[in-house]
Amino acid sequence: MKIKTTRFLSAFIVSLSLLWFSPFLVKAADPIEIHSGETISGDIAINGQMDSYTFQGTTGQGVVIEMAADGSGLGPAFYLYGPDGIIETQVVGGYNVTRIRLEDYQLKQAGIYTIVAAASGGWEWTGKYGLSLVLIGGSSSSQQDPDGGSIASGQTHSATINPNGDTDIFTFQ
């Protein structure tokens, strides 16, 4: 009796993003700080790459996070980690999705939050993206993205959604 064996050769990439929440541990790379009303451009340059962003939040504070491919077919995904290092929520696109958004979400703790941006494998596993953050009750614009701000009844205000993933916020009383 002959037994036929087949060998398969495959390649894959593994990415590890360590989120340290102890002052006694050394970080390999510092995350980028993002502020309410800001949109940051990023680039997932290699399969498995993850980028991290931090912001200060308070318990019960409303948050909107948006991520979108910018001139690429990147399938976006992001994961929101609380100050304790435990994932609070995630938004993962999928096939044929190039824009995702977390809205109507309230933070569960006070402290420094971490957003980990990655690819979900939509059309492409790599590409440029825009990531925006809005904290309800926070700033509605930034030096990098001055669009937004207060608007009065009957007033018209022009703004630009650029780059993809940008969110412009207007407040009124």
Image (spheres, rainbow, N blue to C red):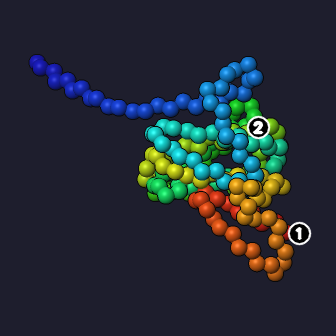
Residue tagged 1: 173
- The amino acid type, in three-letter code, at marker 2 is Ile
User: Which residue does the image show at 58% across and 59% down from the upper left?
Assistant: 164
User: Which residue does the image show at 81% across and 49% down from the upper left?
Assistant: 61
Q: Is residue 3 above or below residue 141?
A: above
- Kindly report the distance in space between the C-alpha atoms of the residues bearing marks 1 and 2: 30 Å
| Proximity of marks 1 and 2: CB atoms separated by less than 8 Å | no
Residue tagged 2: 112
Farthest right residue? 173
- The amino acid type, in three-letter code, at marker 1 is Gln
Q: Quadrant of the C terminus?
A: bottom right
Q: Quadrant of residue 87?
A: top right
User: Which residue does the image show at 80% across and 78% down from the upper left?
Assistant: 155
Q: Nearer the viewer, residue 133 or 120?
A: 133
Q: Position of residue 24 (x, y in %)?
A: 73, 19
User: Neighbour class for label 1 at 10 Å: few (<14), some, many (≥20)?
Assistant: few
